[in-house]
Amino acid sequence: MPGPLIPHREEPLLDAFPESCYSHKEQCRDRRREGLNLAAEPSGVIPFAGAAPAGRTDMTDIRSRFFEVDRPEGRFFLYRPEHLHTYDALSTFLNGVIVVYPDTPPADEAGAFRLFETLGLAEAAEADSLYIAFPLPAEGGTWGAADIALFDGIQSDLTGADIYLPRIMGGKKDEGPDSSPADGPQDGPGGPDGPDGPGGGLPVMDAPVAPLSRGEARDHISGEHVYVIAGGRGAAFVNDHLSRHANRIAAMLLVGGTMTPRTETGRPVSVFLADPCPAALDYYVRADGAEPQEEGRYVRPGNPAQQVRVLPEGTALTAETAALACRELFRLTEKMKLNACESREDIYEVRSLMTWPDLKALGIRVRSAEFDPADGSLTDLPAERTESFRTVHIYTPGDLSAQEKRPLVLVFHGHTGDPIEMVKSAGWAQLAARERLILAAPADEDPATVGALLDRLIAEYPIDTARIYTTGFSMGGMSSSAVGKAFPERIAAIAPMGACGGSLRPDYDMRYRLPTFMLVGGADDLNIRPDENGVPMAVGLMPGTVEQALNINGIPTGAPDYAANPYWGHPADEVRQEVLGDLTYHICDYRVNGETLVRAVIVDDIVHTYTDRMADLAWDFLSRFTR
């Protein structure tokens, strides 16, 4: 018999989240109570101006969104799309930029705008929330090693922060981790573009650079969706110089261009090549660790995002070619930050290429709506964008029938995050397509609101009420736990990630088991802390959640012994590891009567971030349980 619903205390997550991780907790609480859109904070971010019809945009005012930017490193022209994701600070993960290097640099703003129109980039910019940047050569003529600094600066402007790429500091040769073969070569002082390399090195940058002259573009990308289009002499610049600084570049379209042969292995970047020289094709195939597939296509085993595709002979840099790259490459590729490493003089990011889902190609239908918990109504929105605290995104198989009962996964976002990103960056959209799942990703994660939303979803969609699950990352992981513990008679299992066991509920109804999958990165210092002897302890965002996850599933715990049981502190029934793509996952299973009821996973060497395999790992566990 289901137990009673237990009233949940007001603002459980906001009050419990560590203050150091929740710097504007009071602002969030005030806006939540007032029902306001969080997009208004912080200052400098333009509020969302309205949703664009899918795949189309009003082209009448695009010229007014195109302007010149002057920086210490040089000048560039920028198109700022009207339709950006601006719900909250980390909505920037959903926006991106294409940097364009044509054969002949534009002479002025009018020339850059003509190239923008010729390549037909406005529609992709609006449909996929992409800035378009046209840098001018720093030294006139065409681009060279000195232009790497401006490429860096463009990203600095759009992220509102300095970029973590290795730089020359005092002319010293880096002997730190940048020379590690595992990370590939070397954007830094010890690499080919360092003082000893042919590129001549990067300029000293020991302080963040100034923002855009028009501040409206600041804070609108996070670096996961950085792309390059280049042709002719522009492609030669990318081949000889920019390719050595590809840490943040997710994908590139290169048409023609020469390349000086090199033997080192570069950083992975997904590439479409048209009329490539042999040196370029060889370099990018080696950088991606790719192997031949069908003619003209090379893919790294285990990671389809690392690919090189040779376009048909005679392909030119046209609007059709640019549209192909946007549709079949840029839209499907992101480069997620996994960690940051320090060299002797600087810091650089470790990033990994991952797939970004195309919902239409996957056969997934998305419905975005405003949910009113007072009356349970859903008011449809015109596009997949989070507009307010009441927005919910619902993903279903495109051919779902009323008679087909399917599992529901409630997907919760992190602090200052956007509901869409957890669905797309952690692999849930791809999993939903394969397993025919229904996903719901609400902006408001309060258990009472989620309970009302759940009632509405069950009334409207063919949901198998015995197979309802929750998941989330960071604060969303806490929410997945809070919702599961508020409604244990309705939720079959939970998967808090980036939050250890999720959140605490001292008055949990112990009549219910709540199978729990938890995952954190091995370098996630929000969740993992060393004890006095330096042994890692996975204590989570709320200490005690690991023990509660075990206890409510009938697994007793004593005092944790982290020396004997690193990370989790308690002996597991089985310990194993799996290698998926480039990452190693350490898995601990805790069992009752032979059944695994708690699975705890550490991902080697990653910080507080997603991987696109998270959903697969979680679903392998969640799908075993029904309520």
Image (cartoon, rainbow, N blue to C red):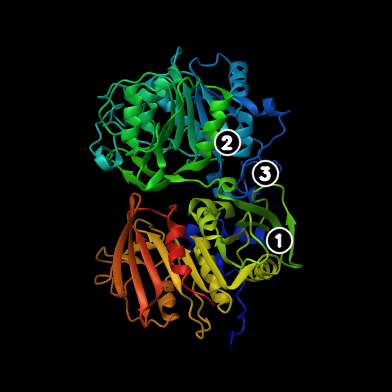
Quarter-of-image position of residue 531 = bottom left
The kind of residue tagged 2 is Leu
Q: Which residue is mark 2?
A: 130
Point out the residue furthest to the bottom here. Answer: 1
Q: What residue would you read off at disc 3?
A: 47
Q: Secondary structure at mark 3?
A: loop
Q: Nearer the viewer, residue 595 or 47?
A: 595
Please name the amino acid that badge 1 sits on. Answer: Phe
Q: Earlier in the sequence, mark 3 or mark 1?
A: 3
- Give the CA distance from mark 1 to mark 2: 28 Å
Residue lying at 50% horizontally and 40% vertically, measured from the top left: 225
Compared to 123, does 17 lie above or below? Answer: below
Q: What's the residue at 60%, 81% (across, down)? A: 6
Q: Is residue 584 above or below residue 560?
A: above
Residue on which disc 1 sits: 371
Locate the C terminus by quadrant: bottom right
Determine crowd level at label 1: few under 14, some 14-19, many 20+ residues with C-alpha closer than 10 A: many
| Residue 546, image quadrant | bottom left
Q: Position of residue 429 (x, y in %)?
A: 54, 54
